[in-house]
Image (cartoon, helix red, strand yellow):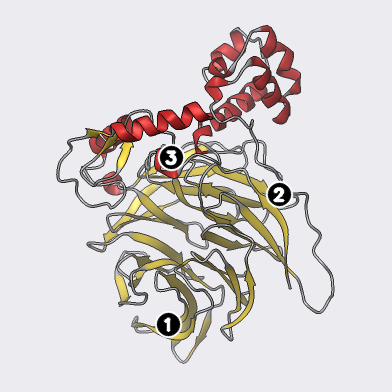
Amino acid sequence: MVSLICTLQDHRDDVNWCAFSPTLLATCSADKTLRIYNTRDFSEVPYSPLSGHGYGVHCCCFSACGQYLASCSTDGSTVVWSTDTGEIEAVLEHPGRNPVRVCAFSPDSSHLVSGASDGTLGLWDFHTKTLHRTGAVNDTTMVACSFTPCGQMFVTGSTYGDLRLWDLDMNQLHAEKNTHDLGVTCCCFGPEILSGSGRVQFRLASCGQDSTLKIWTVSRSNTGSCKMQLLHTLTGQSAPVLSCAFSADGQLLVSGSVDKTATVYDASQGTLLYTLNQHERYVTACAFSPSTPLFATGSMDKTVNIWRVEDGHSGNEGKSLPGRKLLGHSRLLVSDWSEEDVGAWLCEEGLQALVENFKTNNIDGAELVSLTKETLASELNIESVGLRSKVLRKVEELKAGCVCTGVPDEYLCPITRELMKDPVIAADGYSYEREAIESWIATKNRSSPMTNLPLQTTLLTPNRTLKMAIGRWRTSQ
């Protein structure tokens, strides 16, 4: 059986990806952050959240040993983090600086691949953090990538609907066209390596906009020829399937869908075992732990559910962890907070010792979001470097407060996911915060953030109707 043991509610926007190491769980979100949890009790590590990306974070993955975490973003970069300290080890700028949609480590962590919205691929030498090779598939967006268990090849999936197999010199070994109508959304290799009769063979799962999850065999002969063969087409979900992942032993396969379900299959037989209905919106991410019988599912409802897979014969029920609550004050606009609101927020964040200090210095909401490392040290006399850093991390979370529950999505800028102050209409017909779209146009070769198609003009038209609607909504809060 499968039992829900914990729900994490810390992200302020859609959860896009989740990944396990032997001891940690990482989640990333359109709120521009990554959050890191201990898998022992799913408490956040001290340095979480990680805030190094300028736009939403699409994907994250751990190195084999769990020492490093990579994340990629609409900002055109892949960031490498130390999981010991939470510090940035390297920033890998994707060729062309187009939005990076997916990244994956090789099993031995010698390589890292990144795929972008313009169809380009970057294969990085991870030890030197330098670009090793580049490749591209024209007129598509790279959205999926996975290395074979041997680490000598990797497969990519795109919105064009094809799966392509590459070697480490970026030679294209095989292209399987039209695997998913309307596009691939995710793919992953199983852990097994089968060899014999002059061939080595792997299992690959892929899912797509056609509402199917497929299991393939991918084989390569001693002469170098490759082929793919479809084993199972799984139709247990009624809408596009957005994510898939094998268990560490390869026996189970989990997938998440637009129909708000996560499904668990017997990967060998292709039979549906469980359908899980605890998410309120699209299930966008799923991952199995490599060391425990746990898996995670992430959703556009901003939550991550942690599930335990029980033996089924042991009769043991998984113990539930206490439900985690979304941090932060209930009032949406931080700039409107009173000194008492700030004090209440400090208590919620476990910073009770600072309440009197903040009150003495008349720190209200407007002052709170303006705090810097210097003012904390010189004016509030907070001597502990660690405590100053913690306060600033919590303040950064509040600055993203306009993506909290309750804000109509049409009032949020698609680029920053923040409440718009000066909305403008671009040539693609979408409304953006003026500063955000102007910055985008200046650095992104005039492509649309929403469609990735060229903008026919850079003319921006003020959206006065939307601005008035946002003003009325703010007044009502």
Circle 1/circle 2 CB separation < 8 Å: no
Q: Are marks 1 and 3 in contact (CB under 8 Å)?
A: no
- Give the labeled residue for mark 1: 219
Disc 1 and disc 3: Cα gap in Å?
Answer: 43 Å
Q: Earlier in the sequence, mark 2 or mark 3?
A: 2
Q: Position of residue 234 (x, y in %)?
A: 50, 80
| Residue 60 image point, x, y percent | 50, 52
Element at label 1 = strand
Mark 3 residue type = Arg
Question: Is 337 or 384 nearer to us in this picture?
Answer: 337
Q: Is residue 63 above or below residue 441?
A: below
**Mark number for residue 42?**
2
Tag in front: 1 or 3 = 3
Mark 1 surroundings: few (<14), some (14-19) or many (≥20) residues within 10 A: some
Residue 2 vs residue 224, the one in the foreground? 2
Name the residue at 50% across, 57% down. Answer: 109
Relative side of 401 to 381, left or right: left
Which residue is drawn at the image coordinates 51% and 66% (left, top)? 259
- Residue at x 71% of width, y 54% of height: 6
Whether residues under marks 2 and 3 lie with C-beta atoms below 8 angstroms apart, the answer is no
Circle 2 packing at 10 Å, graded few (<14), some (14-19), many (20+), is some
Can residue 22 be seen here? The reply is: yes
Q: In the depicted view, which residue is nearer to us: 313 or 403?
A: 403
Q: Nearer the viewer, mark 1 or mark 2?
A: 2
Give the secondary structure at mark 2: loop
Count of picture labels:
3
Residue plotted at (82% across, 67% down): 317
Looking at this view, name the residue that lies furthest to the left. Answer: 456
Residue 14 percent coordinates (x, y): 50, 49
Whichever of callouts 1 and 2 sits on the residue coming sooner in the sequence is 2
